[in-house]
Amino acid sequence: MYATKEAIIAKEHDPNLEVHILMMEMRAFSKGYWSYFERARDQYGVKYTRCRVSALREIPHNRDLVVEYWDESGEHRCETFDLVVLSVGMEISASVRDLGRRLGIQLDEYGFCHTTQFDPLETSRPGIYAVGPFREPKDIPESIVEASGAAAACARLLGSARWSLTCQREYPQERDVSAEAPRTGVFVCHCGSNIGGFLDVPAVRAYARTLPDVVHAEDMLYACSQDSISAITQRIGEHNLNRVVVASCSPLTHQPLFQESVRAAGLNPYLFEMANIRNQCSWVHSNNWEAATAKAQDLVRMAAARAALLSARPVVQVTSRRKALVVGGGPAGMTAALYLADGGFPVILVEKGAELGGNLRRVHTTPPEDSRMAARNPRLVLDELIARVQTHPNVATHLNSQIVDSQGFVGNFTSTVQHAGGQSDQVSHGVTILACGAQEYRGPEYGYGSDPRILTQQDFEALLARDAQIGSATGYSTGDRLPERVVMIQCVGPGEKFCSRICCVVALKNALALKELKPEAEVAILYRDMRAYGFKERLYTAARERGVIFVRYDQERKPEVEIQPAGGSSAIRVRAWEPVLRRPILLHPDLLVLSMPVVPNPDARQLAALFKVPVDTDGFFLEAHVKLRPVDFATAGVFMAGMAHFPKLLDESMIQAQAAAARAARVLSHETLVTGGQVAVVDESKCTGCLTCVRICPFGVPTIQASLAGAGSIIGAASIEAAICRGCGLCAAECPARAIQLMHYTDAQMAAKVRSLVYSDVELSC
């Protein structure tokens, strides 16, 4: 995936560049990875070749590089390249190994930190936690999730001491600038080469100095660095600035940071504006220096025009309800509930089913951490989680119940819980964690449902578990009841559109479990790519060592299944194309096991609508930002955990549940929350009480209040409570009487921004 990212960036720099990726497998195993790979291949023209490179040498006279390999068709190839980039693996440095030894924590043979499977962030030494690639090779989103999970583990230990040693940050008295003429400072960021490498930042800075009301402009290498943040605060005082514009990256991620620097200088944070000249400019026009520079100047001019009309906005403190609602009683939901409860916060746990456990009830073994270890029994984890939830004084559990309504905002939610008997209760809570899980797909592909000899991996795992339990109870081998020949087919149904992440690992786990119970059994796995990511590679190696046969297939040549009457010598026939032998093969399994993908629960979309949170095109919950906020929704105060977000193994679901608990605890730990500022305001003199705002608001904020009109008549006028308003602006956009203004995005401010785009500053001054 790293190679694919670098290939796309290279193609964006030079669309005519030829980029070849020579690979063994495409490990596009995480959320959005498969579509990213397809975009690189189909839209950018990156060429992927399955092979093993046998030689790399330099041609002496011209210094070109020759790569020698055998492709999948069996042909020997030699290709010449200008540059060869090696996709090397992650390893632990000597200094980090030494740190682990000095801390007295257990490391594995490669230097990675050993953590337990069912407490996946805790090291061998209690109170010391390991996150990120120190545990196992992983990418940024998973590292961020683990970091938040470790924060939850620490908060659970330190909950009783919360706020006892904290210091309140002091800000200077806010300056009243309402009577002052605008004095705007513009700060243009190079963002290293992200912006400065694709447009003329000094030219943008020089242009900013010519704009109306701009009294200071400068460029910075990294505007978000601590030194630059301090410099912005200092410049506000030096030049008596009362408006600030930063031209850099996305306000979604960096605006709060710059607003803090403005507050530190004694200005209201709403006197700040950003121009996104990275995402909206340098990244879009990376191959056109002049166009990117001109557009950056346009964006800065627009931002400065709006900044001149900005005004200070008041904020209010609202009391927070320090209780959490967790929807879903699977391993993710129970883990999140326990971490919050251990931290001292009351939790309401709502489970639609009659018992806790979710999909964990259908998991009988987990992949061993090492090929030399036996898989561990997750039933012990399930029993422990349920016992702790049911006996915890801070957890109130509601079984056979579901959420049918939810209103409010972060810190102040009110939800309706409907129980099995039909009665309903209203519960108040400050945060919500959605952990409603997912389910195994059960579609008709490859004849599933038409013959009892065609199973899913979940069915097969249950069969293996029953056999192992009988053997353990009787002391006799039960291998003769197990199938002699098993064929597994990967990427079934929706698994052709997105990688379900865990299917390959589960297939490897079950293949090894069968080999353990019946070593002579024949197992063949038909796959597109074996997504054995991270340490799961050890399972892949162990499976090959135990004699499991792997046959790769293409989308154009999928396996074909023929079903014969039960009891025949060839009850099931599976035809496949063997790419190495370059000929078709015919398999006669006793059982056909389909690696069905994980798909969202039907409840997920209903819950998304109730809590006003988004889902992606596959129906999984959509995070606010894949790297910066991987467990948050865009809706403040609502978080996600477990397979409702994307398919995960047990330890991965538990880690994300810990992360969601940490994010939720950030809200619950405060008695009051700040709100207001960017809110809708009604001009009652213009309002006709038409109810448009009441109908359009997705959060149910506007109400109609009676007010006196001429001659003592009473009419209804809209009222919007600032503490509840989310600032989405829908009511302002829809109001037919133009009686509603969204503060900080008023009509006048936005019109000035648009005018400055249409007309140059010279034309505006005329």
Image (cartoon, helix red, strand yellow):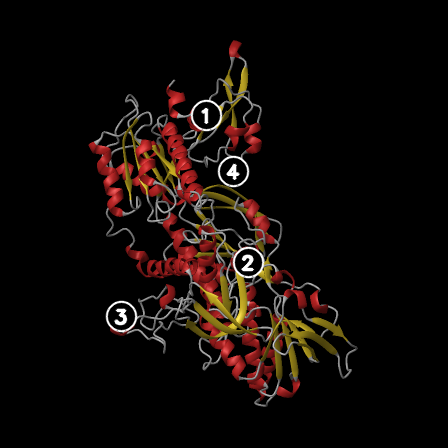
Residue contact between numbered discs 1 and 2, judged by CB atoms under 8 Å: no
Q: Position of residue 642 (x, y in %)?
A: 50, 59
How many numbered markers are drawn?
4
Q: Which residue is mark 3?
A: 95
Name the element at disc 3: helix
* Residue 650 numbered mark, or none: none
Q: CA distance from mark 3 to mark 4?
A: 52 Å
Front position among marks 2 and 3: 2
From the image, state whether disc 3 or disc 4 is nearer to you.
Answer: 3
Residue 366 shows up from this direction = no
Location of residue 476 with respect to 747 vertically, above or below: below
Q: Say which of marks 2 and 4 sits in front.
A: 2
Residue type, numbered disc 2: Arg
Please give the label number shown on residue 747.
Answer: 1
Asked whether disc 3 touches disc 4, contact meaning CB atoms under 8 Å apart, the reply is no
When asked about the image quadrant of residue 176, the answer is top left
Label 2, label 3: how far apart the Cα atoms are: 39 Å
Image quarter of residue 459:
bottom right
Q: Is residue 30 left or right of residue 187?
A: right
Residue, disc 2: 41
Task: Using the numbered discs, state the Cα–Cα distance from disc 1 to disc 2 in whole angstroms.
Answer: 44 Å
**Residue at point 55% right, 45% down?**
610
Q: What distance separates the C-alpha of mark 3 from that of mark 1? A: 58 Å
Q: Residues within 10 Å of mark 2 (few under 14, many from 20)?
A: some
Residue at x-position 38% and y-position 40%? 319
Kind of residue at badge 4: Phe
Q: Are marks 3 and 1 in contact (CB under 8 Å)?
A: no
Q: Indicate left or right for 253 with 68 as reference.
A: left
Residue 526 at x, y percent in the picture: 62, 73
